[in-house]
Image (tube, rainbow, N blue to C red):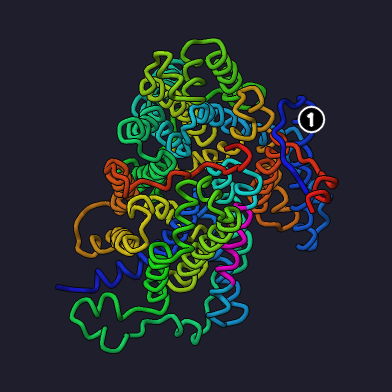
Amino acid sequence: MVRMIKRADITKFKSISIRIIAILGALIVAGLFIKLLGHNPLEVYKSMVLGAFGTQHRIRQTLIIAIPLVITSVGIMIAFKMNFWNIGAEGQILMGAFLASFVALNFPALPKPLLLTLMFIAGIIGGGLWALIPAMLKVKFDTNETITTLMMNYIAIKWITYLQYGPWKDPKAMGFPKIADFSQQGQLPKLFGIHIGWIIAIILVVIVYMFLHHSKKGFEITVVGQSTDTARYAGMDVKKVMLSALFISGGICGITGMIQASGVARSLSVEVSAGYGFTAIITAWLSGLRSIVIVPVSILFAMLLQGGSYIQTAFQIPKAAAEILQGLILFFILGSEFFIRYKLIWNKKSSKEAK
Amino acid sequence: MDSSFFVAAVYAGTPLLFATLGEITTEKAGNLNLGVEGMMLMGAVAGFGAGLATSNPLIALLAAMLSGAVGALVYALLTVTLRANQVVTGLALTTFGAGIASFAGKSYTGKIMTEEFREFFRAKSIPLLSKIPFIGDVFFNQGIFVYLGYFMAIVLGIYLYNTRKGLNLRAIGENPSCADASGININLYKYVHILIGGALCGLGGAYLSLVYVPTWQENITAGRGWIAIALVIFCKWNPYLALFGAYLFGGLDIIGFRIQSLDINIPQEIIGMLPYIVTIVVLVIGTARESKENAPPKGLGNAYFREER
């Protein structure tokens, strides 16, 4: 007979090793799958790692993927802290990119620092306002935010597509439906071969960490997330906290949009978000909603993505394999949480006695 | 009045109907499964693959149901037995299902089913009923899959509201500890209904790949799984109302093409936003009407743990 007992506490070492075992479990299951496809799983994993970190160029590519993941995860985390399941990052990224592009395309001749600053602010506003709509619906009507934020994604995608094929179509592209490239002033500068988004990412992680742990507003978010009743009892304006937190959450996702448009695409298209909004949900959650942990987890997932596209060319394994692997890792980690929270006790004696 | 728009609305609403019925079954057991999109995609690809391999429509449907149920099994294992967070598990299932479908579907692009296979799903009028003016055209001159949708909605309605087991199920969704005290096997009920829910979602996906599109496309569901989750709330967890809701949204899905053919100058992308905007509006209205009858199952989203009562 198996009994489950809630653990009173668990050492950090134990909880980390349970998670590592879970990731290994996911890799083993995925490995069996790769074996079935007729490949050597170890070879595939090895070339995934090499594909992501093998050369300096590949390391740069991996970090360029990690940047939007870090920033978006940090943004999503703030909403998740309040149990607000913001899965609309994809749309918030796009709308941030939209407003930033609006600035970049309309004032292309401004001095570079000024233009980039304005674009940055526009990105925050675009993403923030887009997140504020579902937040207001939640606060006013208690509407399920999971679905509203998701629907907002689709609306944003349609909106950008509309601009791309309609009013913002570049007349110089000879009929090709694309939006004009930003001027030189509207493009993020590079440092060590990577656009300076990585510096913004690091600064944001630190700011959000300080904000959540050492500021009154951040504390309020944590309390609202744990119990709205407690928050109300303590005299907090729960609705206001929720609205402002969601503006920040969406605003940070909007920064991702600005960086991707300005630093990577140098223009606006639906490809700017490229699924980062969804992957970041996983990375935010896997890091246990801790801003510092988000960095290594995001780099790990960037490795999965970059390595995933590498094995596509090396082994003809479709890119979707990386998506399956992400899902598997998440399943195993979700399952492992149980063993962190509960202890199983096999009690043979008592079951015999019971008979 | 021209009935062709309504015929097409029912035709387009059927995948939503299956997914909505599936999610109602799951949520009545107290579990919120956000993996509908993933399970639909798994069903779509499995149904298509089995159809290509065997040219047997029934085997294709069975494969779709099975693959949706497998997705649901992973979800059930994690949320019921291991008490994982239902929201995150559902999202993971969507990622996983989308990956599986995109992976397995790679080789299906451009392939089509045999003529006999497609004939099986073509419209067949029901004698007598199809003679009713307008209604006959819209509802009883459809394919077998659409009829299966009516059948499933009615069966689920009778099951939920007129049988002992249905009552037990609703009790679990509302108050699991009471249901447990009255001797109902909670975990068994949860597992069975989550699996049935997954199988229904799988069918919804298979309808898309086998009947509606009917070739293989990347991301063939295009967000229908999420719309279905919203429809559950819109339909107040009632299978009969799900018929109405699904066909209404089926109409919204195709209205873009209709407007275009009327030569009205609205960009396609703007019309394409309609289903999503209406989903949000419907959700707001759905949750704003507060009454006991419309409320979600009380235990929805919470893991049940006997020892923690």
Q: Quadrant of the N terminus of chain B?
A: bottom left
Q: Does the magenta stretch include residue B71?
A: yes
- The boundaries of the magenta stretch are B63-76
| Residue toward you, A69 or B260 | A69
* Residue holding disc 1: A14
Q: Where residue A295 sits: x, y (%)?
A: 65, 27
Tell me, yes or no, if residue B231 can be seen here: yes
Tell me, yes or no, if residue A171 can be seen here: no
Q: Where residue A191 sits: x, y (%)?
A: 63, 21
Q: Where residue B126 sits: x, y (%)?
A: 32, 86
| Residue toward you, A160 or A109 | A160
Q: Mark 1: which secondary structure? A: helix
- Residue A214 as seen in the image, left or right of residue A248: right
Q: Quadrant of residue A189?
A: top right
Q: Where residue A210 sits: x, y (%)?
A: 57, 13
* Above or below, A28 relative to B243: above
* Above or below, A41 relative to A298: below
Q: What residue is at 30 percent from the left and 80 percent from the top? A: B140
